[in-house]
Image (tube, rainbow, N blue to C red):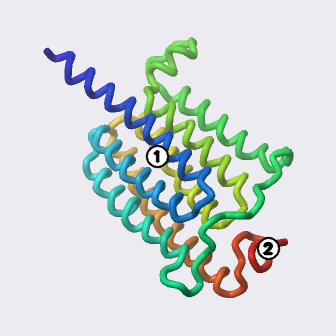
Amino acid sequence: MAILPEALAAALEVMLALLLLLMALACLVDRYLRRACRSFVCFAVLMALTWWQLRAPWLAAVEAVLGALLTGFSLFFALGFGAHHRLPRRDTLPGASPSGVRSWLLPLTWWFMAAAASLLLVDDVGTRLSEALAVLGPLALVGLAIIGLGLWGFVRHRHLLRRLLAFNVLGSGIFLVLAEVAGPRIEAQALILTGLIVALFGSLLGASLIRRLFILDGRLALGSGTGGKE
C-alpha cells in the first residue's frame, strides 16, 4: 500500500513537468500578446503547484502572489488598459535572423554550462550519463528545456513584451533546476525566494519602460522607430 502514494506523486510530477513545458512553449510562440500573457499566468500557477509538490508550500504561496498575480498584472499593464495607448494585439515584427551565429553563441554556451553544472552537482552519480539523468528527475530535465526555450525566445523575439515574457520563463526554468538539484534545503529555497523578488522588480521595471517607449514614439523594439520599424 505504501507504493501507491509514491506512484501517484511520481505521476503528478511528470504531469506537472509536461504541463509546464507546454505552457512555456505556448507563452513564447504565441504572437497574440494578450493570449501569451494569459499563458504566462497559467504557467506561473503551475509553478506554484510545482513548489507545493516539491514540499515548499511557502514558495508556492510566494509564486502565486509574485509570479501569477503581480508579474501577471505588470504584463497586462505593459499591454495597456482602455482605448488609449494600447499595444497592438499581435506581434508583427520579424524575428531575429537565425543565421546570426554570434547572437546564438552566448545563449547556447550558457545553456550547455547550466546543463553540465546540473549533472555535476547531482550527488552519488557515477560516470554514466543515463544514471545522472535518472537522478535529476523529470522536473529538472524540463527545467533545462524551459531554460533553452527562454534563451531562444529572448534571442529570437524583437518585441519588448515578448522578451520580457522570455526573461520570466527563463528565470522559472533556472529556479526549477536549482530546486531539483539542491533538494529541500532551506538555503536553496531562500535563494529561489530572492530570485523571485528580483524577477518581480525586473518585470515591473520592464513593463514600465515598455509603456513609456510606446507612449513616447510607438516603439515596440529596441533600436526601432514608430511601430517597431528600423
Find residue 184 and report its horizontal and vertical position in percent: 32, 38
As helix, strand or loop, the secondary structure at mark 2 comes to: loop
Residue assigned mark 2: 224
Q: Which residue lies at the image location 78% right of the left edge and 43% below the top edge?
A: 105
Q: Amino acid at mark 1?
A: Phe
The residues bearing labels 2 and 1 have C-alpha atoms spaced at a distance of 33 Å
65 lies above or below 217: above
Q: Position of residue 47 (x, y in %)?
A: 39, 47
Q: Which residue is mark 1?
A: 175
Name which residue lies at 26% across and 25% down.
8
In which quarter of the view is residue 73 placed?
A: bottom left
Which of the image's four quarters has the N terminus?
top left
Who is closer to the viewer here, 53 or 128?
53
User: Of the residues shown, which amino acid type is indicated by label 2?
Assistant: Ser
Q: Secondary structure at mark 1?
A: helix
Q: Identify the mark nearer the N-term, 2 or 1.
A: 1
Total labels: the figure holds: 2
| Residue 66 placement (x, y as % from top left) | 38, 63
Q: Residue at x 27, y 40 (%)?
A: 55
Question: Which of the two residues, 202 or 48, is positioned nearer the viewer here?
Answer: 48
- CB within 8 Å, label 2 to label 1: no
